[in-house]
Image: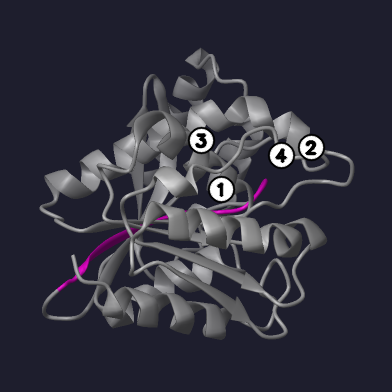
């Protein structure tokens, strides 16, 4: 059955008008679907394009809600750093997770190359929210790392945050050398609680923007918003994923919806 679904997936790929590298996206899906140990693959639809997501339910008796996870540039929903640890770690704290395959380009694509793809993230986020609402989930948290954060913020800037209950941005503001951000983050206009988390060994642009992000969060006025630095962690949280999961889980545990 899984082979049939992947074959249908390839047919849909050929009909899509996406600007993303759909062939690479399919290769990523083919590589990881059979390797999933925790959770299960689900196929969501963004317009005329089906895409992979991984749903991992909590084993806790009373679920607090669900977290939609957006990975970083060119990666996949079970990526070993950030996305994978969060999707498998948060269920222990009472959160279902739904990790999405985001639009990708070739491996050497830069920030400026990805900017035109930001708009393609919106239908995927909307499809994930619809999937969770249909499953009866009340509280939805959007968690986004790196380029995924750019995509999430693009969606919030145009759609607002009315369909989510909290937002977690990880490594927000990362670009490439000589390529400044094309779009400001709408943090000052967000109503939901926001967690801005990054490592002390982050990329310079993420570190340099930290005061600006914090000021915007304070302007928004949600007293539950926080900015947290993970000591020693780099942009990808190599060897610090357990600390990242702990920080996110503890913050979510304190949120009052």
- The answer to whether marks 4 and 3 mark residues whose Cβ atoms lie closer than 8 Å is no
Residue 31: % across, % down: 59, 52
Residue positioned 19% across, 71% down in the render: 64
Residue 151: % across, % down: 54, 40
Question: Which residue was labeled with disc 1?
Answer: 148
| Nearer-N-terminus badge (2/4) | 2
Give the distance between the C-alpha atoms of the residues marked 1 and 4, in whole angstroms.
14 Å
Does the magenta run of residues contain 66?
yes
Viewer-closest of 208 and 27: 208
Residue 133: % across, % down: 16, 46
Question: Which residue was labeled with disc 4?
Answer: 181
Above/below status of 228 relative to 129: below
> Does the image show residue 37?
no
In this rendering, the label closer to the viewer, 2 or 3: 3
Question: Which residue was labeled with disc 3?
Answer: 154
Question: Which residue was labeled with disc 2?
Answer: 109
| Nearer-N-terminus badge (1/4) | 1
Q: Secondary structure at mark 3?
A: helix
In this rendering, the label closer to the viewer, 1 or 4: 4
Residue positioned 17% across, 72% down in the render: 63
In this rendering, the label closer to the viewer, 2 or 1: 1
| Dot 4 crowding, Cα within 10 Å, few <14, some 14–19, many 20+ | some
Above/below status of 229 relative to 132: below
């Amino acid at each position: 059955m899984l082979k049939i679904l992947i074959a249908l997936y390839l047919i849909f790929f050929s009909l899509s008008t996406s600007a993303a590298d759909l062939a690479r996206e399919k290769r990523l899906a083919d590589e990881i679907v059979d390797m999933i140990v925790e959770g299960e693959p689900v196929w969501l639809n963004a317009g005329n394009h089906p895409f992979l997501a991984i749903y991992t339910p909590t084993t806790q008796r009373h679920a607090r809600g669900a977290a939609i996870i957006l990975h970083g540039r060119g990666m996949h929903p079970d990526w070993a750093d950030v996305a994978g640890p969060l999707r498998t770690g948060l269920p222990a704290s009472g959160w279902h997770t739904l990790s999405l395959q985001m639009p990708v380009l070739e491996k050497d694509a830069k920030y400026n190359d990805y900017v035109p793809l930001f708009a393609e993230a919106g239908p995927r986020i909307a499809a994930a929210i619809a999937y969770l609402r249909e499953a009866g989930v009340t509280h939805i948290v959007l968690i986004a790392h790196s380029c995924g954060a750019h995509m999430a913020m693009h969606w919030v800037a145009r759609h607002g945050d009315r369909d989510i209950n909290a937002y977690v941005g990880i490594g927000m503001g990362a670009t490439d050398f000589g390529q400044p951000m094309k779009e400001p983050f709408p943090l000052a206009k967000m109503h939901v609680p926001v967690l801005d988390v990054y490592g002390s060994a982050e990329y310079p642009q993420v570190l340099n923007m930290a005061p600006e992000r914090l000021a915007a969060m304070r302007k928004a006025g949600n007293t539950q918003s926080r900015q947290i630095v993970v000591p020693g962690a780099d942009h990808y949280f190599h060897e610090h994923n357990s600390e990242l999961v702990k920080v996110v889980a503890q913050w979510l545990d304190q949120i009052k919806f």
